[in-house]
Image (cartoon, coloured by chain):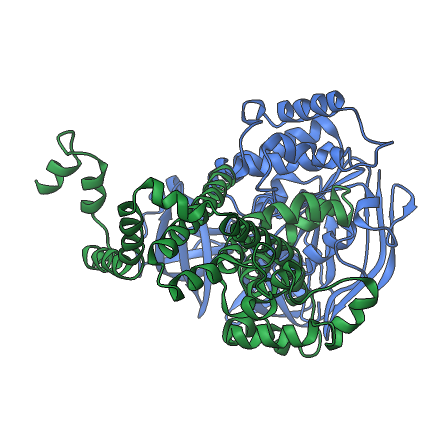
Chain colours: A green, B blue
Amino acid sequence: MADLAVTGPLSFGWRVGMLNRRSVLPGFGLSFGYAVTYLSLIVLVPLAGLMIRSVGMGPAAFWAEIASTRVLAAFRVSFATALAAAAINTVFGLLVAWVLVRYRFPGKRVVDAMVDLPFALPTSVAGIALTTLYSTKGWIGALLVPLGIKVAFTPLGIVLALTFIGLPFVVRTVQPILQDLNIEQEEAAFSLGATRLQTFIRVIFPALLPALMTGFALAFARGLGEYGSVIFIAGNIPRVSEIVPLLIVMQLEQFNYAGATAIATTMLVFSFLLLLMINLLQGWMRRRHG
Amino acid sequence: MSIVASRIAKRFGSYQALDNISLTVHSGELLALLGPSGSGKTTLLRILAGLDFADTGSLEIDGRETLGLSPRERQVGFVFQHYSLFRHMTVFDNIAFGLQVRARRDRPSKAAIAERVHQLLDLVQMEWLADHYPAQLSGGQRQRVALARALAIEPKVLLLDEPFGALDAKVRKELRRWLRRLHDEMHITSVFVTHDQEEALEVADRIVVMSQGRIEQVGTPTEVYDTPATAFVFDFLGNANRLEVEVTDGRAHLSGLALDLPIRLAASGPAIAFVRPQDVDIGKTVEATMAPAVVRSIVTIGPTARFELDVGGHLIEAVVDRERSRGLDLAVGDHCGVRLGQVQVFSRSS
């Protein structure tokens, strides 16, 4: 009877129906409750605190904090470098995943394990190592000087550091999908007269696109928030190579909590919108292709 | 467009997948490669398509040496067991794929491609599903799209790898009859692989029975069913009782039971006799030329009844229709008579 009351026309909305739907898996209530509590404590409450704080400031004060040319420039640098690094990682991460899945070669396991190193290494170590290599006197940097390319202490250096940090995200999201890709699809394309390039562009790539987008989104989000590696290689020149996370730390050091909050909130909103867009796009693709 | 394969061999490591296969597929016929798993039938089909490579041998399709050509140069239509449709493309785009990937100078105009695709959709009776994605189709529909996709490139030959293998029994029957009708209309040289003898017997013009990388027999369905060339073919084509016998003076002896039958085997010695369950005659009493038997079990399956009979210590299966079974009025444990008709005897070596 209880079931009838909930799923019948008198039930008040699908929400109740969902919670009461019978399932062979036990513990829905417990696990759902735990998940919500956990997410609230870890993610929602700190972010809500941030939002409340910034709403409390009033729009004029908020605007005053973020509208300076220095802050706007930092936003531009942060978003542009994170996007560029994520884009680079999408291309080369796909390549790495492809080689790891499709070919057998000596030392494959070692290479496979190396992909995860950026996860494990303290990011500041990575930043210092990259700076040493790419400064004008470094091993690689010195080679680039005659070409007129400066990497360390420029936005290019930031892109480099973020590329290092973000690589595993793309590789590890694309790899399992590539592994599961049915070889018969490629054989079908060949037998229908497609060249290898056509097969890649028209058959393989569309199948990988959702995973590539996830990898891109993760690498991008990681890049936006990255602090440790970037501050060493960026040179942190205001309006040129200064990133938003650094600016927030600087505001905090000057006890300007309002400023830090306003910048952080703006960053949060834009990141969220971008990630939401990518997610919606993915959902749309998945619905179309099942 | 005939296919002539000669002395094709293929090894996978130490495993001889194909052992000097020579085979001719006549223009316009529908040929079945029939065999158990591991018989090499799929490997042979994939070599015809260029998806696998032969170690030695030669292959001519339409009079042209083909082994050195890549799949895309062979103009062969291939239909996979699990359809392998492109999931991110609509039915229309799947079928159009083979035409759209052609080099610009050979590629039909957009309108011509659309017209061809609609013709094919009409042919496979799926006009109304052109805008659907493969995930939205049933198994039978997917296989028909896969067939239309393969036909779009106007292939010289059509190769089908267990085309009905992934479908449920009812759809499978419908689809294979439909394929037979389609073939009667189009007359495209076709080879299909199957492990289902019923399917091969019903659909094919000729059947190639394979076992362990060799061809056991090639013939029309009637030929391979009625006059199997080897013990393997007899055993594989439908259920059969297998009896170990001694042949002396042109007569086969089963211990305790003399089979007085004209057999083709001249040599004396140990041999294997086969008799199909429906060729075993049961009598209420032991009539002339019958041997005494005891009923061990009776199972009624739809319109037929299957008897298990103990004949002098040998278990023999008999299938009779239900009416006859009622007339016999036998129960488990009863004594009866049994007569073996249509016995085929093969010497032990074959």
Camera-nearest residue between A31 and A144: A144
- Choose between B88 and A52: the one closer to the eye: A52
Which residue occupies the foreground of this view, B200 or A75?
A75
- Percent x, y of residue B54: 81, 61
Q: Quadrant of the N terminus of chain B?
A: top right
Q: Is residue B244 in sight in this rendering?
A: yes
Image quadrant for the C terminus of chain B?
A: bottom right
Left or right? Give the position of A29 relative to B211. left
Q: Foreground: A108 or B93?
A: A108
In the rendered structure, the answer to whether residue A223 lies left or right of residue A152 reads left
In this rendering, the answer to whether B121 lies above or below B258 is above
Seen in the picture, residue B305 relative to A287 is either above or below; the reply is below
Residue B82 is situated, as x and y percent measured from the top left of the image, at 58, 47
Q: Residue at x 73, y 28 (%)?
A: B186
Report the residue at 69% width, 60% height from top: B40
Residue B261 seen in the figure: no
Q: Going 56% across and 55% down the picture, which residue do you hit?
A: A82
Number of marks drawn = 0
Q: Quadrant of residue B273?
A: bottom right
Q: Position of residue B291 (x, y in %)?
A: 47, 60
The x, y position of residue B310, in whole percent, is 41, 64
Residue at left offset 74%, top offset 24%: B110
Q: Quadrant of residue B38?
A: bottom right
In this rendering, position of residue A119 left or right of residue B32? left
Q: Residue furthest right?
A: B64
Q: Is residue B20 left or right of residue B265?
A: right
